[in-house]
Image (cartoon, rainbow, N blue to C red):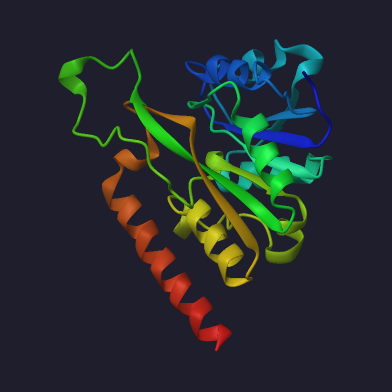
Amino acid sequence: MTTPGISLIIPAYNASRYLREAVDSVLNQTVRPRQVIVVDDGSTDDTRDIALSYGELVTVITQANGDAGAARNRGLAEANQPLIAFLDADDRFVPHKLERQLQCLSEHPEAALCICRGCDFWSPDVPETARRPANLEPQLRLGQVPTWLVRREVFDRVGTFNASPAFRFAEGPELYSRIESAGLGVVRIDDILFQRRLHRSNKTNDSRAHLDGMMALMKRRMDLRRNSK
């Protein structure tokens, strides 16, 4: 089933191991997006070739490496639909993710953003002995961009992703803080519709850089509160 209205953006950097599973989880949606964009963010492996193998089903854009925020912004510049969804190249959707969120936004026309629950899973290629302690329970992470279905006008109101290196580990929460500060309607649903892959190359494995990103986010939130007074 295909319906107009959704552009789906996948930033991909050296993602050849998992990209096909991510794209297939989009193309196998019960409601397929009209536009699927893969932004090859300066990969040095065969990420681009895998994306191109889908032919006209996927629009492939190549840019110099700028990290996920810059790649999502590049995808947004090419997006031509009124609703936007995102997926990281190493993760996947459950089959009815977009259908359920479309239904939710239809039921809540006042909402600018619908957020679902997600859960983590260990990639099968990571041996048990290499798996660190992790919370595999379903979670509602407001800044986790692949759990969103968002109306395009949100970006016209609050801007796009902050591609500053300071927010490399917090570009989603930083954008969500601006959405929240602008008073835009957000609806949350309990459905578990997104699955985040845990593997050896997750960005959050860099604990120091992750902490720096969270500190930058806290400062940003304080600045927004101060400016709103």
Residue 85 at what x, y percent from top left?
66, 39
Relative vertical location of residue 180 with respect to residue 99 in this rendering, above or below: below
Relative vertical location of residue 122 with respect to residue 182 in this rendering, above or below: above
Q: Residue at x 21, y 25 (%)?
A: 131
Q: In the picture, residue 149 is in which quadrant?
A: top right
Residue 39 at least partly seen: no
Residue 195 at what x, y percent from top left?
45, 29
Q: Nearer the viewer, residue 17 or 153?
A: 153
Q: Nearer the viewer, residue 41 or 17?
A: 17
Residue 135 at least partly seen: yes
Q: Residue at x 35, y 25 (%)?
A: 121
Q: Residue at x 53, y 40 (%)?
A: 147
> How many tags in the picture?
0
Q: Residue at x 54, y 27 (%)?
A: 89
Residue positioned most to the top: 53
User: Quick one: quadrant of the N terminus?
Assistant: top right
Relative vertical location of residue 178 with respect to residue 223 in this rendering, above or below: above
Residue 112 at what x, y percent from top left?
69, 55
Q: Taking 150 as reference, is 181 left or right?
A: left
Q: Taking 101 as reference, is 76 left or right?
A: right
Residue positioned most to the front: 107
Q: Taking 17 as reference, is 36 left or right?
A: right
Residue positioned most to the bottom: 229
User: Quick one: quadrant of the C terminus?
Assistant: bottom right
